[in-house]
């Protein structure tokens, strides 16, 4: 990394505290090793702090400014945009539920600004690339905002997102340090930041390469006990370590220990039959959500987070579940005890792999039992409760999860939107606002994230690029797209879970899986320049080139999904 230079700050930022009743608050920032340390203190009465901002004037640019915009949670878009041309998708017209799903700050972006979560890269003609990042996210998220002012200067703002957390009178909060570096290579800069962050949060990166099967992308919520048994009966010939049952088995969202009528033999039986087949039992749960009609919500209305008007807080609107799923209040000690209990019960049943989904629900704005907690702290409280219950040896996979706060708790993380048995966004998701079409399920969207977030693999956790789909029937993926996606998963070094009805797979599909696993193991254990990396991170549009383990995958046609592996 000779081409990477930490920048020693000389320019003092302009600081601002945003919120309600924050007049008595001051922020200060002091230069520190390769960046800044900053804090906010409250000399006035207790007040709700929305955020603290530090802004630097980077001066004029000699031409178009490209910004690598990193997404907030697993499914959020991650892409390079052009300042003054592309816009942040969070406009006032977008429904607040969609904004709170995708961004640390659910308020609309300012016109003209681009936002990036946790880290940002700024590319200006004739200048070295600039990388700024926050080192840590256990206390708060950090959003970077890049804007051209009316003189044509590039303004960079780092914003500590406190989400209306109450800071008591006389209190203060240390904010996560900011680091800045210049360099020539986008991947190297991102990796430099990710490694600093990982050290501070003690990332869990030691889990073995994961090969397995998941029920979601063939059966979706329609999966039955019969489907699981049929899979297990065929699995002898497949090299799966983990067999993970996804959404569809549970009595209701929120009631994870009771099955519905499609799993008549019960949930312990799921774990027992997978273990009897010699595989690691895996299960999907959305631990922070509960449907209003679930036993959890009806028996414990006090466990629900609330809107300001007292109604329960909606965590996700999902037609597949019959409507609104409500957010459990993870700042309530009873809820934390419940989360710990559910995780320990699942482990007692035999599950050793838990896919924890819709985790961003802990971070949405509302009225919470402990108003002093930030969204990142709420998420961390909930995740730590699950980890306590699951024990240190259970493999925890985050999904739908704000990334930074989960580092050090989870073993793996979904780093992109859902794939889909279709390359492009399928018609039933086209109601998505045009600015958000990088986020609905589609294999192309999964491909984009697999490249743009390749730098996180084995630095923060194991990347989960989402499932392989190898079948050539019961899918809209054509042969080229199946191969391109499978090879991208391989070169990324990330988790390789197959999501097919095994009855639909033959020798050709098996050969492709074997090729992907061989490439995957090589990429996963590669060191130095052979670690997985995307080499065109700063090209607007779909990135094309992924290298890993000495191999190179190049996307030739972004619509046809044709690619070349060398
Ligand atoms: C199960 C699925 C699978 C999948 C997850 C997640 O915004 N939404 O309504 C939305 C619904 C489902 C979804 C993502 C977003 O997929 O990523 O792998 O486990 O849940 O329901």
Image (cartoon, helix red, strand yellow):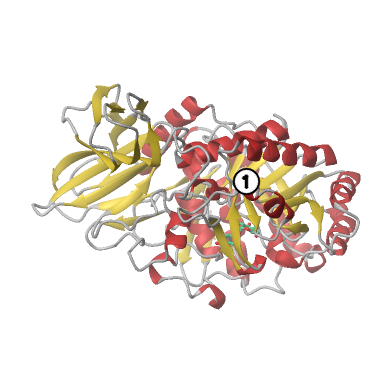
In the image: residue 1, left or right of residue 357:
left
- Front one among 394 and 341: 341
Q: Residue at x 19, y 45 (%)?
A: 155
Q: Position of residue 98 (x, y in %)?
A: 46, 62
From this view, report whether residue 347 is shown above or below residue 270. Answer: above
Q: Residue at x 47, y 72 (%)?
A: 559
Displayed quadrant of residue 413: top right
Q: Residue at x 21, y 48 (%)?
A: 124
- Furthest-top residue in view? 33
From this view, report whether residue 330 is shown above or below residue 361. Answer: above
In the image: residue 170, left or right of residue 484:
left
- Furthest-bottom residue in view? 427
Q: Position of residue 217 (x, y in %)?
A: 68, 63
Q: Position of residue 497 (x, y in %)?
A: 69, 52
- Quarter the N terminus occupies: top left
Q: Residue at x 49, y 30 (%)?
A: 198
Mark 1 surroundings within 10 Å by alpha-carbon count, few (fewer than 14), some (14 through 19), many (20 or more): many
Q: Position of residue 421 (x, y in %)?
A: 63, 69
Instruction: Kindly identify which residue carries mark 1.
Output: 303
């Amino acid at each position: 990394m000779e081409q990477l230079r930490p920048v020693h700050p000389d320019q003092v930022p302009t600081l601002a505290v945003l919120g309600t009743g924050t007049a008595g608050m001051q922020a200060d920032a002091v230069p520190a090793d390769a960046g800044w340390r900053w804090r906010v203190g409250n000399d006035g009465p207790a007040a709700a702090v929305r955020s603290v901002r530090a802004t630097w004037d980077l001066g004029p640019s000699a031409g178009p400014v490209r910004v690598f915009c990193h997404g907030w949670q697993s499914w959020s878009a991650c892409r390079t945009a052009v300042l003054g041309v592309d816009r942040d998708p969070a406009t006032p017209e977008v429904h607040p539920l969609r904004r709170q799903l995708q961004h640390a700050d659910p308020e609309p972006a300012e016109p003209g600004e681009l936002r990036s979560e946790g880290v940002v890269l700024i590319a200006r003609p004739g200048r070295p690339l600039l990388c700024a990042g926050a080192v840590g996210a256990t206390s708060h998220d950090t959003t970077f905002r890049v804007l051209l002012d009316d003189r044509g200067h590039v303004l960079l703002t780092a914003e500590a997102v406190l989400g209306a957390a109450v800071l008591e009178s006389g209190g203060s909060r240390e904010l996560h340090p900011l680091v800045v570096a210049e360099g020539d290579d986008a991947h190297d800069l991102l990796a430099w930041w990710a490694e600093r962050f990982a050290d501070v949060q003690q990332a869990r990166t030691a889990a073995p390469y994961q090969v397995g099967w998941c029920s979601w992308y063939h059966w979706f919520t329609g999966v039955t006990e019969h489907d699981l048994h049929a899979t297990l009966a065929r699995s002898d010939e497949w090299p799966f370590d983990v067999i993970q049952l996804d959404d569809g088995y549970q009595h209701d969202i929120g009631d994870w220990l009771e099955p519905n009528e499609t799993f008549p033999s019960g949930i312990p039986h799921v774990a027992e039959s997978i273990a009897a087949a010699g595989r690691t039992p895996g299960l999907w749960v959305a631990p922070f959500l509960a449907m209003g009609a679930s036993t959890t919500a009806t028996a414990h209305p006090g466990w629900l987070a609330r809107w300001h008007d007292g109604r329960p807080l909606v965590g996700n609107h999902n037609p597949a579940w019959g409507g609104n799923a409500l957010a459990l209040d993870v700042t309530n000690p009873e809820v934390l005890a419940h989360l710990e209990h559910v995780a320990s019960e699942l482990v007692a049943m035999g599950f050793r792999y838990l896919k924890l989904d819709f985790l961003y629900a802990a971070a949405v704005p509302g009225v919470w039992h402990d108003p002093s907690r930030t969204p990142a702290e709420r998420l961390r409280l909930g995740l730590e409760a699950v980890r306590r219950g699951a024990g240190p040896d259970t493999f925890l996979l985050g999904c739908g999860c704000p990334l930074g706060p989960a580092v050090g708790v989870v073993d793996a993380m979904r780093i992109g939107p859902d794939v889909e048995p279709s390359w492009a966004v399928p018609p039933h998701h086209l109601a998505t606002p045009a600015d958000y079409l990088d986020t609905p399920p589609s294999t192309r969207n999964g491909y984009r994230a697999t490249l743009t977030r390749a730098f996180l693999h084995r630095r923060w956790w194991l990347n989960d690029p989402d499932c392989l789909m190898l079948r050539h029937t019961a899918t809209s993926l054509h042969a080229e797209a199946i191969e391109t996606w499978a090879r991208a998963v391989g070169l990324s070094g990330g988790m390789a879970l197959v999501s097919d009805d095994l009855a639909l797979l033959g020798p050709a599909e098996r050969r492709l899986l074997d090729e992907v696993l061989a490439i995957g193991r090589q990429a996963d254990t590669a060191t130095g320049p052979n670690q997985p990396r995307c080499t065109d991170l700063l090209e607007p549009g779909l990135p094309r080139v992924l290298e890993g383990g000495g191999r190179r995958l190049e996307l030739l046609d972004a619509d046809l999904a044709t690619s070349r592996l060398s």
